[in-house]
Amino acid sequence: MSDKAPDTAGMDYLQTLPRRWVTVYIPMIVFLILLLFPFYWMAMTAFKPNEELVSRAANPFWIVSPTLAHFEKLLFRTDYPQWMWNTVLVSVVSTFASLAASVFAAYAIERLRFRGAKQTGLAIFLAYLVPPSILFIPLAAIVVQLGLFDTRWALILTYPTFLIPFCTWLLMGYFRSIPYELEECALIDGATRWQILVKIILPLAVPGLISAGIFAFTLSWNEFIYALTFVSSSETKTVPVGVVTELVEGDVYHWGALMAGALLGSLPVAVLYSFFVEYYVSGMTGAVKE
Amino acid sequence: MASVTLSQVRKSFGSTPVVLGVDIEIADGEFCVLVGPSGCGKSTLLRMIAGLEEISGGDIRIGTRVVNNVPPKERDIAMVFQNYALYPHMTVYENMAFSLRLAKAPKEEMERRVDEAARVLGLVEYLGRYPRQLSGGQRQRVAMGRAIVRKPQVFLFDEPLSNLDAKLRVQMRTEIKELHQRLKTTSIYVTHDQIEAMTMADKIVVMNAGVTEQIGSPLDLYDNPANLFVAGFIGSPAMNFLPGKITAAGIAIGADIHLPMPANNLAEPGREVIVGVRPEHLAVADDGVPAEVVVVEPTGADTQIFCKMAGVEITAVVRERHDFKPGTAVRLRPELTYIFEPASGRRLA
């Protein structure tokens, strides 16, 4: 119920200010610094001119004369826009395909109660536990035999191998939190299985779908091993692979451009998270409020 | 509207039998209450009538049609669930119109029927709200409204009041009864609360451990319980039971207490029996059986006296006011007794 009095005060009176500094603020500050420092370093390097980057005298934590040269190199002298487009395309398509498959799988395992449903759920989870660093070898053989090597399809079709198990498990937990009576009531009201799924379950599972979607999107966006193995030409590469293969020449690291690429590449995911963070949390904790 | 007939209906979950051959006939327009302790199979029976559980054996008829293998939506029934099962993402109007929308009813018809039901239940001003914005009682009404708009042949209620507080429960009980009197739709109502059963039912089916113990009108069950279980289950406070023995003169309870033989008693002398006395059939009287007061609970209208009689704790309910204290010796006279066979629980007299 929403009309409860806010109980944020709770037992706060037991906490004196110095105690709160020790137990809450200081650990939080340390944690934040640890987490955010790499991003700070990345952002700073992206805007730092090469002279400052290599100079021993310059302050490593600050920029004296910021520049957009690295971005200019990245956007106009490499295939970065193409990598970005590939990443978007591969992530979006494989996320939606995986979500669709996972919805059906999770609903069937959770609610159709067929013989062996539990074992199927477990098998799907076990599939998720097989590390990609082992799986990429047989998958590479399949990709080559299907004639998909060095195409975006190679990635769109292989990413669901780890996305579907993950999304299925997340959605299974979410579907479980939807009261069974709602479906039974709909059944008596005259709904078919399909109508129950579309009109009752999916609208209620939106937070779960969003969190599964964000997770799947992030996993595909950052995926490295398959993208490194299954594509080779520059115009089919994704951002994570393109940046490290094309901006490192021999032992020369184009740090500025590398970091600019990383910065631009991490922005879409950050934006996505910030939009849906509330859904994301309720999706992970799985609660349907009546 | 239609009658509902259950003949030899059975249900097992795996190898565990839950309902063991139940026969019930519910007449057209009747309000039938299935009552019994939890786990007695009453909800399972209701779910079988609804089509939510498969039937392991026997026949269920709605009207003249056997519905054993008919899917729920084709049985022409409506069900009110214990937790209301309102669709949280739909407004009250959408909740109530959902079944009509699925049936592709014309929009005017849908609006007319929802409006009619909303007026009957006093929900007109809440049609635009979501279930989470309603109180427990209002949600309960929406759940009933959703059932009403469909104009089904049979209403099924699965403990619909058990999530409400005591006061609201009494109020909703009356509302459901009123609604039934107005619509006269055959209703089957499951509850574990015997007071709900007594107050609402035309016909009560007392169930225990998967079988029907007795079927009858509320007062019939109260006045003529068929066995120990029904006698103990129907009535509040529950009937007192005292172990006794048939003698030539009457019934002996312990060494000191002798009760007169009920009129039509056929039991032979020497036989062990259980004597049942309802608390309201115990009167404070000088010629009564001695007992010792343990606790006194005045409720205003009457007073419940818990006492020890022949070593057994019994309850008496008296209307007149006495100044009893714990430890006081009282004499209670049983006005009406029931005699049961200890082994089978069958009523002898």
Image: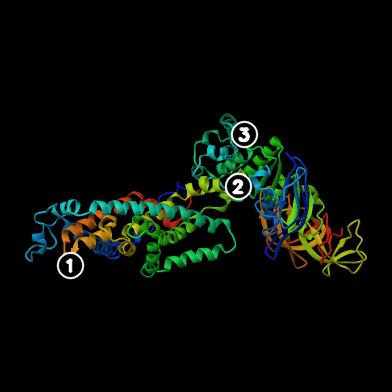
Residue behind mark 3: B120
User: Which image quarter is the C terminus of chain B in?
Assistant: bottom right
Read off the residue under disc 1.
A250
Disc number lying in front (3 or 1): 1
* Place of residue B96 in the rendered image (x, y in percent of width and height, measured from the top left): 57, 39
Report the disc number at residue A201: none
The amino acid marked with disc number 1 is Gly
Front-most of residues B92 and B241: B92
Residue located beneath label 2 in the image: A187
Dot 2 amino acid type: Leu
Q: Is residue A267 visible?
A: no
* Earlier sequence position, callout 2 versus callout 1: 2
State the SS at label 1.
loop
- Tag 3 secondary structure: helix
Q: Categorize mark 2 by other alpha carbons within 10 Å: few (<14), some (14-19), many (20+).
A: many
Quarter occupied by the N terminus of chain B: top right
Q: Which label lies toward us, 2 or 3?
A: 2
Disc 3 marks a residue whose amino acid type is Val
Q: Position of residue B4 (x, y in %)?
A: 75, 45
Q: Residue furthest left?
A: A57
- The residue lying toward the viewer, choosing from B82 and A152, is A152
Which residue is pictured at 91% across the width and 56% down the height?
Answer: B264
